[in-house]
């Protein structure tokens, strides 16, 4: 189940690229709140508050603004070129029992015996699309690989999820598998190519011609 965290935001009066840059210089991140048929609100939040929240995988937030609060989910985040600083965020208003569709990151847990035996761990899905009540949005989908041997795979149908979570992807889609390493055969080098050709010494031919004169 998702962990609800509080996020204090402030309304922002000015919009546009120049205003957003000024906010970022002050350690604030511009954002929007929308949804539930209400007007969109432009806000800002402290970078030191929202950045660790996003990095930890939190999705459900309790917005604190002007003495009131409302529930929302982090719907979209824009990053800088290096994926380190948040440039903008969008929050979608929701009710606690409302069903929402989200992309949730997959996180592997444990050590695969197949990898210890020399196999290669191949993660096919880094996230999955789910539909569930807002209060049930998981921060991550954890996949245990303790029993994943050589040639084994975990499919979407094998995921251990609460009954209220509906996965939107095909049951037969592979989430993660351990594949056998492919042996790289060394190319045979022809003997003629392998032989070292003695370089011609400049002047040797001329010396022989002089000796014959």
Image: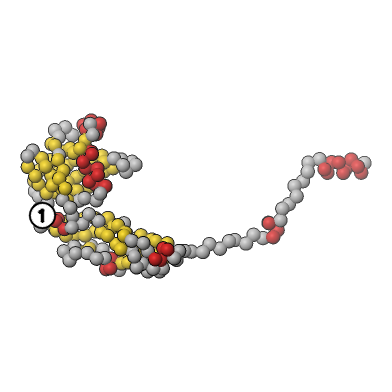
Q: Residue 190 appears at what percent x and percent y? A: 67, 60
Residue at image point 34% right, 68% down: 147
Q: Residue 62 appears at what percent x and percent y? A: 13, 47
Q: Which part of the image, by quadrant, shows the C terminus?
A: top right
Q: Nearer the viewer, residue 204 or 105?
A: 105
Image quadrant where residue 84 sits: top left
Q: Is residue 77 visible?
A: no
Report whether 153 appears left or right of 10: right
Q: Which residue is mark 1?
A: 96
Q: Is residue 195 visible?
A: yes
Q: Is 208 located above or below residue 188 in the figure?
A: above
Question: Badge 1 local density, few (<14 within 10 Å), some, or many (20+)?
Answer: some
Q: Nearer the viewer, residue 113 or 82?
A: 113
Q: At numbered mark 1, what does the secondary structure look like: helix, strand or loop?
A: loop
Residue at image point 88% right, 43% down: 209
Q: Nearer the viewer, residue 42 or 28?
A: 28
Report whether 143 appears left or right of 7: right
């Amino acid at each position: 189940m998702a962990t609800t965290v509080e996020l204090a935001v402030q309304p922002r009066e000015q919009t546009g690229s120049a205003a957003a840059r000024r906010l970022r210089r002050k350690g604030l991140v511009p954002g929007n709140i929308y949804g539930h048929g209400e007007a969109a609100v432009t806000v800002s939040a402290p970078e030191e508050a929202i950045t660790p929240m996003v990095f930890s995988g939190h999705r459900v937030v309790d917005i604190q603004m002007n003495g009131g609060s409302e529930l929302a989910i982090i719907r979209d985040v824009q990053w800088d070129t290096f994926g380190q600083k948040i440039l903008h965020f969008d929050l979608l208003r929701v009710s606690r029992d409302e069903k929402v569709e989200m992309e949730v990151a997959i996180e592997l847990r444990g050590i695969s015996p197949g990898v210890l035996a020399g196999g290669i761990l191949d993660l096919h899905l880094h996230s999955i699309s789910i539909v569930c009540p807002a209060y049930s949005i998981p921060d991550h989908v954890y996949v245990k690989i303790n029993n994943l041997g050589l040639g084994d795979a975990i499919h979407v149908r094998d995921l251990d999820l609460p009954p209220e979570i509906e996965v939107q992807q095909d049951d037969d889609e592979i989430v993660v598998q351990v594949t056998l390493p492919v042996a790289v055969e060394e190319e045979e080098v022809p003997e003629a190519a392998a032989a070292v050709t003695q370089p011609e010494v400049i002047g040797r031919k001329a010396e022989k011609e002089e000796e014959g004169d």
